[in-house]
Image (cartoon, helix red, strand yellow):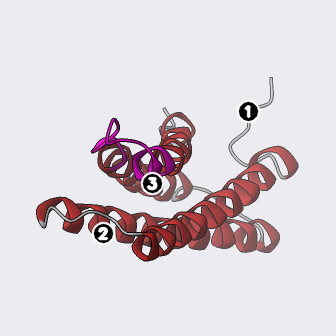
Amino acid sequence: MLLHPIVVHFPISLVLLSFIFEFLEFFGKSKFKNSTFLFSGLALFFAIISVQTGNIDSQPLNLNEEVKIILNNHQSNANFSLLALSIIFLFKLHNILRKKEINLKVFIILLSFYLVALFFIFRTAYFGVKLVYDLGVRVKLN
């Protein structure tokens, strides 16, 4: 059973939720105080699982050069998004442990990391779509 297609959508939705709640937390009255920490932690957790299941699911494949190039782009973008999500999570953890409020300058830096993460997540998804829908990787024909 292939696990990658099952878990791959969780980090996408959780990063988007975390990004939205980051605005609500910053401009709101602390209603959503630690929700972004929870969402970013879950996004990182599922991103790690997604990357690992993707690596496992791609091991037995016998691919031509065109597919290998696209798979490599897919994996590289996934790793970059994982790095950005790790930075976001560690940043949030640091602020919670130090009990620091986020000022506007720090908020803008944090949002820029979210945008970087989302950029690489959407590029990862783009190459994943090319692999499955354009090239038929792991698609069973009836």
Label placed on residue 56: 3
Task: Read off the residue under disc 2.
Answer: 91
Task: Please tell me which residue is depicted at 56% across the width and 56% down the height of the picture.
Answer: 58
Per the image, label 2 sits on a secondary structure element best described as helix
Task: Read off the residue under disc 1.
Answer: 140
Residue 33 within the magenta-colored segment of the rendering = yes
Question: Which tag is nearer the camera, tag 2 or tag 1?
Answer: 2
Q: Dot 3: few (<14), some (14–19), or many (≥20) neighbours within 10 Å?
A: few
Q: Quadrant of residue 98?
A: bottom left
Label placed on residue 126: none
Q: Position of residue 92 (x, y in %)?
A: 29, 62
Quick one: 73 or 21, which is closer to the camera? 21
Quick one: 17 or 141, which is closer to the camera? 17
Q: Position of residue 100 (x, y in %)?
A: 20, 65
Quick one: 68 or 96, which is closer to the camera? 96
What are the residue bounds of the magenta stretch?
22-36
Q: Earlier in the sequence, mark 3 or mark 2?
A: 3
